[in-house]
Image: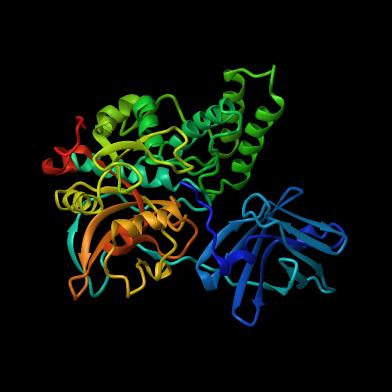
Amino acid sequence: MKPKLFILSLFFLLSSIIYSQNNKTQILQGSWMGRITTDNFSLRVLFRFEKTNDNIKGFLDSPDQGLKDLPFDKVWTIQDSVFVDASKSLNAGIIFKGRVLPGDSVIDGIWGGALSLRLSRTNYIFTLKTNLNPEIEGYKIIKLIESSPIKDQQATGVCWSFATTSFIETEAIRLGKRLVVLSPMFYVTLTYIDKAEKYIRMNGKSYFGPGDLTFSLLKAYKNYGAIPLKVFSGKKDSTSKYNHGEMDNALLEKVKYYVQYGRGNMTTERYRKDMDEILTQTMGKAPDTFTYNQKQYTPKSFAKEMVGVNPDDYVEITSFSHHPFYSKFILEIESNWNNNYYLNLPIRDFSNVIDYALLHNYSVCWDGDAYRCEGFNDGFAVLNDSINTITQEMRQTDFDNYNTIDQHNMHIIGIAENNKGKRFYIVKNSSDQRNCGGYMYMSQEYLLLKTISVMINKEAIPKEIKNKFDFTL
């Protein structure tokens, strides 16, 4: 799934910063706070710079919008001027140009080419809010499925892997296995390399990026197994945060190079090796064998013994009227690069399957549009109060007009109600650089309108709905 967020009020937050003074790059180290003001809004912005050797890394926080760790592509200085570029990471170009004033404690500049922005040194640290408790005061939990702890994807676009590993961990518990926390990053390397090969073979006419779908993880799980998180974190430095900006850019540049210039000089082995080397530089190398609880495993033997999930037991279901109901079809979304099939149900059966699954102890892996809602930063995904009924036509219209896109993956583990009996779904979120990572409540109306698809165990589909298909699931 595509991880980029496009919020109008945020568009200026999508660029880089420019710094200055003859080799005063060391001066940029630390945090700088400023405010962007127009007739319509006023927003604080926090620039954070980290200097390593001769390089400067920069990140943007927006405390007023609950966003953190948005990466810059490049930060550099020319004499007393500072520049920040976010062309690739945020599709924003150079977002800030400034001049370091005498005293080295103020940078006076322009944001987005038009807005005045003066940055001053600050010790302020912005921390995202995290909901680590699935219970919310004023709501009654109807069903809560035992699951694994919350994991944070941080500055990456791999929510699909975090959501799906959480789903597999939860299924393993349902099957009677002991809790084991899996490494989401193990599957990122495997999937990225396969995706690169498809992109190159399709002459650049296939999706390539960090986003993906549950299918890719299940395929990698089936072919390669699983590794616990404490064995392979996917970080070369265990104390650092996940940040895939530079890696994603390098991978994209490499596959584009092969498409443009690789003719006559390409082999599958070569470009897969090149991709693996880029991934390893950031994520490290997953082991072929490892010890867990004093026993030796390979990833495949670990998956078989300690997880026990059969990837062939799971299907994705959706609900769109541009294909026949009770059929399967290749869903036309960009991240479905491998042409996977979805089961298509009318909206009522789609809703009934989700409720039946949860009430019978089967959790649900969710793909949809998470941010076009009210209240997200407060831990809720809800629609306008005036929308009480979601129809099939409303779902289709939103999908046809790109008002519902596959933007984020999460994991549904329960059902709750407010004091008026209104239904909400208890969702595990992997943060995604926004406030209220952790648990959130999604209204039933929001789920029915903004869901692209859900993955469930085949046994979670009621028999009366299974019987409506003219093929065996």
Say how the picture is coloured.
rainbow
- The answer to whether any part of residue 182 appears in the image is yes
Q: Residue 311 location, x and y as percent?
A: 29, 32
Q: Quadrant of residue 70?
A: bottom right
Residue 11, how many percent across, how many down? 61, 64
Direction bottom: furthest residue = 39
- Residue drawn 75% across and 70% down? 110
- Picture coordinates of residue 78 (x, y %)? 85, 58
- Position of the C terminus, as image quadrant, is top left
**Residue drawn at point x = 61 percent, y = 29 percent:** 203
In this rendering, does residue 133 appear at all?
no
From the viewer's side, name the closer residue of 273 and 393.
393
Q: Would residue 408 appear left or right of 419 to someone viewing this image?
A: right
Horizontal side of residue 258 vs 372, given as left or right: right
Residue at coordinates 65% horizontally, 19% vertically from top-left? 266
Identity of the residue drawn at 22% across and 71% down: 139
The correct choice, above or below, for 211 with respect to 347 in the image is: above
Residue 194, compared with residue 373, is above or below; it is above
469 sits to left or right of 35: left
Please tell me how many numbered marks the rendered image carries. 0
- Vertical order, 263 against 234 (above or below): above
Residue 390 appears at what percent x and percent y?
29, 62
